Image: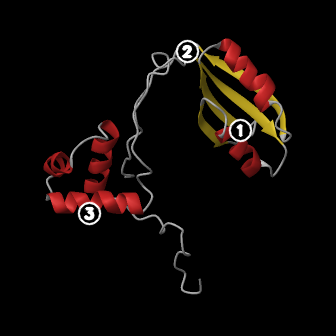
Amino acid sequence: MADGGASAGSPPPPRALDAIDRDILRILQTDGRASIRSVADRVHVSRANAYARINRLIDDGVIRGFSARVNHERAGQGASAYITLKIVQNSWRTVREQLLALPGAAHVALVSGDFDVLLLVHTPDNRTLRELVLTRIQSIDEVLSTRTLLVFEETDLGPALPTELE
């Protein structure tokens, strides 16, 4: 657009978060089920102000959604692994779509370094994990190689809270 505005359908440019916005995000990251009244009381604003701020954070794409934090082992997903992939140059979008469709895919990232993609998966057991890597992932044409790092134990640090740069 000639006026420098956002194109139709794209989110607005990032807006600076103030202390109240950051406090709201901390509360919702800790308890995504917190009521508007509870959030408003804890950040010392009116319910209408809290409601408007949360909706703005959603509309601006800062809040991407709400979800439950799952204990994968208790949910029948006892095997977890990080899988690194080297892929054909410029194939990220194609590979990403195929990885997102995999059962148990929890996180996909394009990274720099010795490999191109980092994938976190949760599967019921090692046999299923082996099948996922050897049959599904390695059969993707653009995947040149993989390396699987089994997760023996993990600690969920919870959500990363936004901080103000000083």
Q: Which of label 1 and label 2 is nearer to you?
A: 2
* C-beta proximity under 8 Å, tags 3 and 1: no
Task: Relative to 152, say whether 138 is above or below.
Answer: below
Q: Which residue type does callout 1 highlight?
A: Val
- Disc 2 on helix, strand or loop? loop
Q: Which residue type does callout 3 highlight?
A: Ala
* C-beta proximity under 8 Å, tags 1 and 2: no
Q: Earlier in the sequence, mark 1 or mark 2?
A: 2
Percent across and percent down for residue 156 are 44, 25
The reply, left or right, for residue 74 in relation to residue 106 is left
Instruction: Locate the N terminus and report the quarter of the image it occupies.
Output: bottom right
Q: Residues within 10 Å of mark 2 (few under 14, many from 20)?
A: some
**Quarter holding residue 143:** top right
Q: State the separation of the CA atoms marked 3 and 1.
A: 37 Å
Q: Quickly name the residue at label 1.
A: 117
Q: Quickly name the residue at label 3.
A: 52
Percent across and percent down for residue 133 are 75, 25
* Residue at 62% across, 27% down: 121
The reply, left or right, for residue 90 in relation to residue 61 is right
Task: Relative to 134, say whether 23 is above or below.
Answer: below
The reply, left or right, for residue 41 in relation to residue 106 is left
* Residue at 34% across, 63% down: 56
Q: Quickly name the residue at label 2.
A: 78
Percent across and percent down for residue 43 are 18, 50
Q: Which residue type does callout 2 highlight?
A: Gly
Q: State the separation of the CA atoms marked 1 and 2.
A: 23 Å
